[in-house]
Image: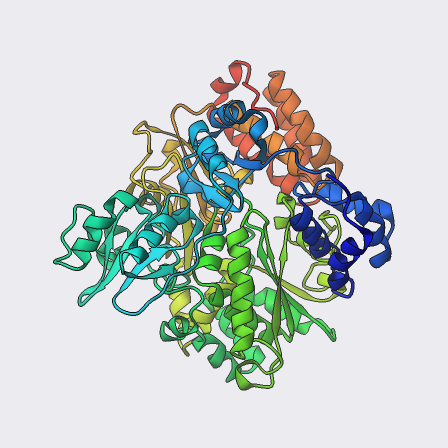
């Protein structure tokens, strides 16, 4: 492949030169256009951003997505995260590589946000579920097409999800077939019952009625049922009365799966903007007080009190402050952020606007991982719509308050989910972790006081502010210091995988057995990992633990982002411990020695069947000496595996390898 012309490269780079932190968007523009970063662009980038050529190379080489050579074949990204591993992903990856041969390049990725329907792959911007070698050959043979657009006509509404989980099992084909059959098809988010996708709902006098899972073969009979008495073999009943839905308390996810995500009319008619309008009638200090009273804690995993963080930023002297939504949701088993952004993007915008007003920030950034292309599109489109309607801009909702938002996209680095690494990436740098203090609340993005909150945290705020007693209502939910609701995500070897919203205080057993139906394989539970790849592995005897931050801390475990990955009793826990170290060695930012070198030594020690005392000594060094949670918490899954399954380490662990 020949090098593009210098003038062509210059025109691509030009729009980003004056943009704060514009190097990353410029690199994405080049990569999206050519499939790689042309050599001729390196010098131009260095000159345009007034940095050295070595620094440009340093940024490019830090991120997995960027490449400096043309791809030799189409790229299939196969997920090797724990949730897909629980469904046999490692063996499937080997089979896909063998079947694809020279027809495709197979690359690892550690989560695609479709954790309930693994093994999963990303190809041509589309996520595929339940991937086999034959399935990979099938989608390689398909022409490259754009995703199906939202359909909407007049008449009785028929709802089909546009969430990537639903699309990965055929929702686009179902929506198109229903549209061709004359139905008024409205694309929504997903209700979270992913084992029933593609789910079709229809308006009836009694409410929305659900049918599923629907395939293209069901369309004729379904259309007949929709125009007749509603009787169908796959009729499930009123959606709101299904056991999965009836047992929830949907505060943050109230609109997800209900509305057309980009419809301003749907959003407002279902409670949207009530929080933002109420906030504008309050003082900024009163808004912060309400958030503090609610007890809302960060839902990204750290669980820091949101109101305290906001007050710290508001009190920090500065001419400029920022709101950053951390949407770099990379933990295997977690996909709530993605579902919210795809299913109710205006909720995040509203929450960020309220946060901006409360702390005196006029600019927000949403940092979305590159593995979520549909979420990127949804948020960018929603922001454009919000600007058009005056929800963002110089005079939001007709007030004197200014606030705007921009989307920035990551490039395949898990570590950028750590808040300071994310800030470095937003500034156009390598995503290396910053030493703390100073905290981002004092010295954050571009050196200014910055609120960094998770997507679910911010999207929970409008409901708290919308009514005078919203904060008290929220605080009354949950248990102890873990107030409110959380989005718990069931993934891995689970019969009924998906996402649900309930107050803290429910047991892990109730989530896995009552909601999830136990393992998909029908075998006994072997292990459960909560809180992503840095979370501890729990035994089947530990799952009566209550879901709250303090209860999990008491057993040396993490709630994290609420992701729950189930393994049956065929799991090899020594292999999972090895994966924790391998994952850390691949995704470490490399800044501190305990994380960078310790994780590599950890893989070697498990392979060599070193003594548990030696592994524990290494874990202690990583936990005490690492700059951030990447190295500091990687010992958690390793220690739990050794503690509860020591017999699994008696034989040599099969090495999965990194491709």
Is 171 placed above or below 544 here?
below
Which quarter of the image is occupied by the N terminus?
Answer: top right
Asked whether the viewer can see residue 610, the reply is no
Horizontal side, residue 451 vs residue 185: left or right: right
Q: In terms of image quadrants, where is residue 191? A: bottom left
- Please state, as top left, top right, bottom left or bottom right, where the C terminus lies in the image: top right
From the viewer's perspective, tell me whether residue 617 is left or right of residue 296: right
Q: Which of these two is toward me, 139 or 604?
A: 139
Of residues 5 and 303, the one nearer the viewer is 5
Q: Residue 574's spot in the image, x, y percent?
A: 52, 23
Q: Residue at x 64, y 45 (%)?
A: 415
17 over 628 or under it: above or below: below
Colour option used = rainbow
361 to 618, vertically: above or below:
below
**In the image, what residue occupies the spot 36% across and 37% down?**
494
At x 49%, y 73%, the residue is 290
From the top left corner, tell me how far across and down residue 317 is, in percent.
73, 74
Where residue 490 sits, quadrant-wise, is top left
Q: Please give the count of numbered marks on the rendered protein.
A: 0
Q: Nearer the viewer, residue 317 or 23?
A: 23
Q: Is residue 206 left or right of residue 119?
A: left
Outermost residue, top direction?
A: 651
Q: Is residue 394 visible?
A: yes
Q: Position of residue 394 (x, y in %)?
A: 62, 81
192 is higher (above) or lower (below) than 604: below
Where is residue 31? Give x, y as percent.
Answer: 68, 48
């Amino acid at each position: 492949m020949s090098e593009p012309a210098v003038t062509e490269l210059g025109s691509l780079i030009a729009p980003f030169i004056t943009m704060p932190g514009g190097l990353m968007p410029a690199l994405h523009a080049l990569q999206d256009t050519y499939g790689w970063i042309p050599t001729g662009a390196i010098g131009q980038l260095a000159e345009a951003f007034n940095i050295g050529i070595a620094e440009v190379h340093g940024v490019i080489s830090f991120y997995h997505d960027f490449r400096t050579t043309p791809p030799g074949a189409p790229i299939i990204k196969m997920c090797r995260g724990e949730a897909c591993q629980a469904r046999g992903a490692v063996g499937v990856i080997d089979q896909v590589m063998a079947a694809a041969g020279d027809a495709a390049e197979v690359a690892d990725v550690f989560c695609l946000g479709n954790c309930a329907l693994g093994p999963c792959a990303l190809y041509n911007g589309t996520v595929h579920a339940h991937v086999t070698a034959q399935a990979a050959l099938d989608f390689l043979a398909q022409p490259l097409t754009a995703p199906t657009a939202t359909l909407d006509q007049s008449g009785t509404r028929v709802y089909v999800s546009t969430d990537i989980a639903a699309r990965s099992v055929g929702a686009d084909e179902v929506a198109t077939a229903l549209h061709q059959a004359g139905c008024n098809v409205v694309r929504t988010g997903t209700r979270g019952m992913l084992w029933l996708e593609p789910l079709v709902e229809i308006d009836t006098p009694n409410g929305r009625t659900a049918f599923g899972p629907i395939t293209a073969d069901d369309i004729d009979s379904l259309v007949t049922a929709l125009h007749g008495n509603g009787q169908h073999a796959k009729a499930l009943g009123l959606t709101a009365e299904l056991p999965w839905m009836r047992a929830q308390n949907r505060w943050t996810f109230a609109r997800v799966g209900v509305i057309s995500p980009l419809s301003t009319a749907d959003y407002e008619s279902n409670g949207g903007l009530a929080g933002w309008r109420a906030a504008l009638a309050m003082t900024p200090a009163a808004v912060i007080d309400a958030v503090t009273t609610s007890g809302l804690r960060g839902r990204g995993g750290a669980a820091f009190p949101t109101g305290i963080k906001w007050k710290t930023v508001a009190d920090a002297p500065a001419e400029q402050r920022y709101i950053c939504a951390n949407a770099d949701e990379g933990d295997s088993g977690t996909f709530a952020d993605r579902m919210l952004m795809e299913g109710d993007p205006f909720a995040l915008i509203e929450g960020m606007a309220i946060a901006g007003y409360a702390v005196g920030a006029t600019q927000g950034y949403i940092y979305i991982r590159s593995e979520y292309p549909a979420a990127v599109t949804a948020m960018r489109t929603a922001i454009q719509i919000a600007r058009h309607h005056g929800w963002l801009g110089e005079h939001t909702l007709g007030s004197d308050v200014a606030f705007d938002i921009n989307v920035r996209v990551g490039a395949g680095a898990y570590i950028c989910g750590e808040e300071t690494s994310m800030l470095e990436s937003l500034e156009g740098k390598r995503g290396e972790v910053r030493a703390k203090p100073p905290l981002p609340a004092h010295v954050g993005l571009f050196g200014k006081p910055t609120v960094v909150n998770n997507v679910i945290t911010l999207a929970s705020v409008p409901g708290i502010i919308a009514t005078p007693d919203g904060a008290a209502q929220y605080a009354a939910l949950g248990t102890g210091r873990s107030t409110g609701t959380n989005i718990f995500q069931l993934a891995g070897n689970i019969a009924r995988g998906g996402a649900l919203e309930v107050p803290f205080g429910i047991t892990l057993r109730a989530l896995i057995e009552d909601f999830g139906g136990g393992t998909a394989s029908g075998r006994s539970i072997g292990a459960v990992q909560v809180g992503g790849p840095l979370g501890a592995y729990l035994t089947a005897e530990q799952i009566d633990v209550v879901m709250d931050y303090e209860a999990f801390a008491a057993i040396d475990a993490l709630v994290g982002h609420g992701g729950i990955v189930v393994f049956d009793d065929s799991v090899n826990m020594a292999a999972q411990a090895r994966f924790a170290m391998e994952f850390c060695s691949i995704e470490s930012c490399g800044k501190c020695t305990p994380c960078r070198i310790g994780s590599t030594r950890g893989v070697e020690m498990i392979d060599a069947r070193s003594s548990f005392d030696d592994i524990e000594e290494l874990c202690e060094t990583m936990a005490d000496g690492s700059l951030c949670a990447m190295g500091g918490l990687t010992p958690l899954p390793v220690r739990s595996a050794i503690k509860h399954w020591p017999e699994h380490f008696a034989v040599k662990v099969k090495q999965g390898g990194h491709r």
